[in-house]
Image (tube, rainbow, N blue to C red):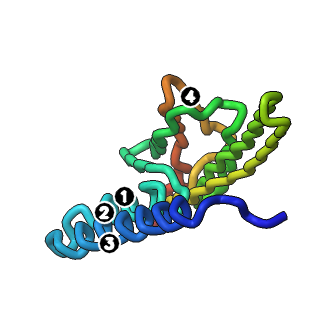
Amino acid sequence: MPDKTPDHFRTHKVQQTVNHIMKAMNEFFSGKPGKNLMESMDQFFSAGTFGGFPVELRENESHYTVMAKLPGVNKEQIDIDVFPQYITLSIQHNELMEKNDSAKSSYMKQESHKRWSRTIPFIKPVDTSLAAADYENGLLSIKVPKKKGKKMNIK
């Protein structure tokens, strides 16, 4: 089925995407080297151009906390896979739009299926069996305890 989207809409969408990429690159390369590098990279890859979502990783002595901003996402759309060295968050979004115009004797049906995924590595191994997640008001918070190593005595 040929794409019936008017050329000016496609051109406008492409221009918006190019403008976003250029703005993100300018912000990324104009900052001080090393300062907020991960935040700049995260913003560049998650601000809609590549279909990502912002993620923040916090660490303390006993655990990691992964936080993701997911406004408008239902918790049923979220998949979380925790592994000993990383965690993967996936969002599945399916949308069906139907429009029936009896005056023009027309019917339109449009489906879209989108999937976003982020993998966050951990520096130290984690205890996957004790990981816990909470989702409230578009904010996903996952607490993942670090594994404790075995202490050894020196003879």
Judging by the rendered image, the residue that carries numbered circle 2 is 40
State whether residue 86 is above or below residue 107: below
Residue 43: which disc?
Answer: 1
Residue 130, percent from left and from top: 63, 37
Which of pointers 2 and 4 lies earlier in the amino acid sequence? Answer: 2
Residue 134: which disc?
Answer: 4
Which of pointers 2 and 3 lies earlier in the amino acid sequence? Answer: 3
Image depth: mark 2 or mark 4 in front: 2
Callout 3: few (<14), some (14-19), or many (20+) C-alpha neighbours within 10 Å? Answer: few
Q: Is there CB contact under 8 Å for labels 2 and 1? A: yes
Q: Is there CB contact under 8 Å for labels 1 and 4? A: no
Judging by the rendered image, the residue that carries numbered circle 3 is 22
Q: Is there CB contact under 8 Å for labels 2 and 3? A: no
Q: CA distance from mark 3 to mark 1?
A: 13 Å
Q: Amino acid at mark 3?
A: Met
Residue 134, percent from left and from top: 56, 28
Task: From the viewer's perspective, tell me whether residue 70 is left or right of residue 89.
Answer: left
Give the residue displayed 69% in from the left and 49% down from the top.
Answer: 81
State whether residue 130 is above or below residue 124: above
Q: CA distance from mark 2 to mark 3?
A: 13 Å
Q: Amino acid at mark 1?
A: Gln
Give the residue displayed 44% in from the left and 42% down from the top.
Answer: 62
